[in-house]
């Protein structure tokens, strides 16, 4: 369990997070990532910020950075499906297919995932063709 960081309840911290989400949604990805990076440095155990930033890095095609951050989240909270799938897809985009499949396997040993099942089904169908 992560310790609650006092900054998580700081109104300025929260307003900067909301601003990052707003400008991300407007398509200003680099600017949003800068704000999220600063917030993450202030509150490194804040998993929602790390998860949003990792997803943004993936969207920006910074797969190496995204995989590191998704991996960090998975180490802190192994049953976070979104982080596991983010790690899987980041590793896959990097051509690290065996590591991606190992992450899928690791997650499926501790939890169920409809999305992973659908992905496996598609992979198996692809092998038959």
Image (cartoon, grey):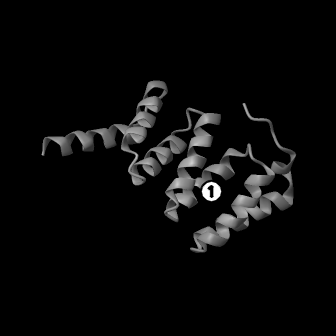
Horizontal side of 15 relative to 25 (left or right) equals: right
Residue 117 at x, y percent in the picture? 34, 37
Residue identifier under label 1: 53
Identify the residue at horizontal 43%, vertical 39% (top origin).
99
Is disc 1 surrounded by few (<14), some (14 to 19) or many (20+) residues within 10 Å?
Answer: many
Residue 85 at x, y percent in the picture? 47, 44
Q: Secondary structure at mark 1?
A: helix
Residue extending farthest to the left is 129
Give the total number of marks visible in the rendering.
Answer: 1
Residue extending farthest to the top is 109
Identify the residue at horizontal 60%, vertical 48% (top origin).
69
Horizontal side of 90 relative to 18 (left or right) equals: left
Q: Does 63 appear above or below 68?
A: below
Quarter of the image containing the N terminus? top right
Residue 129 at x, y percent in the picture? 12, 46
Q: Does 72 appear above or below 15?
A: above
Identify the residue at horizontal 61%, vertical 74% (top origin).
28
């Amino acid at each position: 369990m992560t310790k609650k960081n006092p900054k998580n309840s700081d109104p300025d911290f929260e307003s900067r997070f909301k601003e990052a989400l707003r400008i991300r949604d407007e398509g200003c990805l680099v600017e949003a990532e800068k704000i999220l990076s600063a917030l993450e440095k202030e509150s490194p155990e804040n998993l929602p910020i790390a998860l949003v930033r990792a997803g943004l890095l993936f969207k920006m095609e910074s797969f190496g950075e995204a995989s590191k951050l998704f991996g960090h989240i998975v180490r802190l909270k192994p049953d976070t499906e979104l982080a596991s799938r983010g790690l899987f897809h980041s590793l896959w985009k990097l051509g690290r297919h065996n590591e991606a499949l190992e992450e899928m396997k690791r997650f499926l040993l501790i939890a169920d995932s409809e999305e992973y099942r659908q992905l496996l089904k598609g992979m198996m169908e692809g092998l038959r063709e």
